[in-house]
Amino acid sequence: MPKLKQSPRFSIIIPCYHDEAQLNNLLGQLRTISAPAPLEIIVVDGAVSITCRSVCRAQKGHWLAGEPCRGRQLLAGALKARGDVLWFLHADTQVTPTAFTAMSRAIDQGALGGFFRFRFAAPREWPALILEPAIALRCRWGVPYGDQGLFMTRDSYRAAGGHAPWPLFEEVPLVRNVRRLGRFVALREPIYVNPRRWQRDGWWRRTWHNRRLALKFAAGVAPEALAVRYEAGNSCLQRHGF
């Protein structure tokens, strides 16, 4: 696939489900950092919330009603996107001021897309010092998940078939297909992930829970079945990444 011209236009796609406070923080942050070209921000609201719609209006983001299924939300947002590069973010993440520069450089150097380095946001606890390099190692051999700010050219996204319409692991076939098409790079630039789920459930218990889900998925259990089985014990499971 040919490289993009200079100054690619970015479309940012954010699935949301009752995460209005975190979404408001993220949208405010995105509006303060420099980008190589005008931004298009699309929020796909699985709860069809009046509050979410108000946040988007105040922060000049496009609000789109969606189903409470992350894969379908991401597909709906990508279908509306007009940018050259699609950047998929979770509502409760934080980005760095140089994120757009890092993505633009990677695309200009021939990458079809990539992902950011996983870091826990403050308040950080000592297990983060073990989990962060372990996640980096997993991504080297496996698939990075959606909370790592996946980005790719719009043409590559479409050629790879887009996100799977699943509530969990919707990015797995997408990333694998993009990698078959060309380079999908790991940026050194960090993205900061909210540690609330690890703090709520316990750092090691949450980590083991995530790995058990991944193992069952790798063994062929359907994402829908995994979501139903674990939703009762994890209210955020269907809506958020790991």
Image: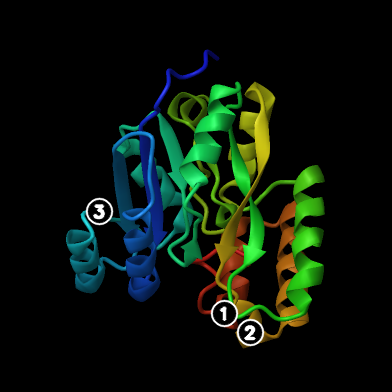
The amino acid type found where label 3 is placed reads: Gly
Q: CA distance from mark 3 to mark 2?
A: 30 Å
Instruction: Specify few, some or many for label 3: CA neighbours under 10 Å numbering under 14, 14-19, or 20 or more.
Output: many
Q: How many marks?
A: 3
Residue 93 placed where, x, y %? 50, 63
Residue at the spot of label 2: 199
Quadrant where the C terminus sits is bottom right
Up-down: is 26 above or below 198?
above
Instruction: Specify few, some or many for label 1: CA neighbours under 10 Å numbering under 14, 14-19, or 20 or more.
Output: some
Q: Nearest the camera: 234 or 135?
A: 135
Up-down: is 55 above or below 198?
above
Up-down: is 97 above or below 230?
above
Q: Secondary structure at mark 2?
A: helix
Q: Are marks 3 and 2 in contact (CB under 8 Å)?
A: no
Residue 39 placed where, x, y %? 31, 41
* Picture quadrant where residue 10 is located: top left
Q: Secondary structure at mark 3?
A: loop
Disc on res. 196? 1
Q: CA distance from mark 1 to mark 3?
A: 25 Å
Q: Residue furthest top?
A: 2
Q: Earlier in the sequence, mark 3 or mark 2?
A: 3
Residue at horizontal 56 percent and vertical 75 percent from the top: 231
The amino acid type found where label 1 is placed reads: Arg
Disc on res. 166? none
Residue at horizontal 61 percent and vertical 30 percent from the top: 178
The amino acid type found where label 2 is placed reads: Gln
Residue at the spot of label 3: 61
* Picture quadrant where residue 224 is located: bottom right
Q: Are marks 2 and 1 in contact (CB under 8 Å)?
A: yes
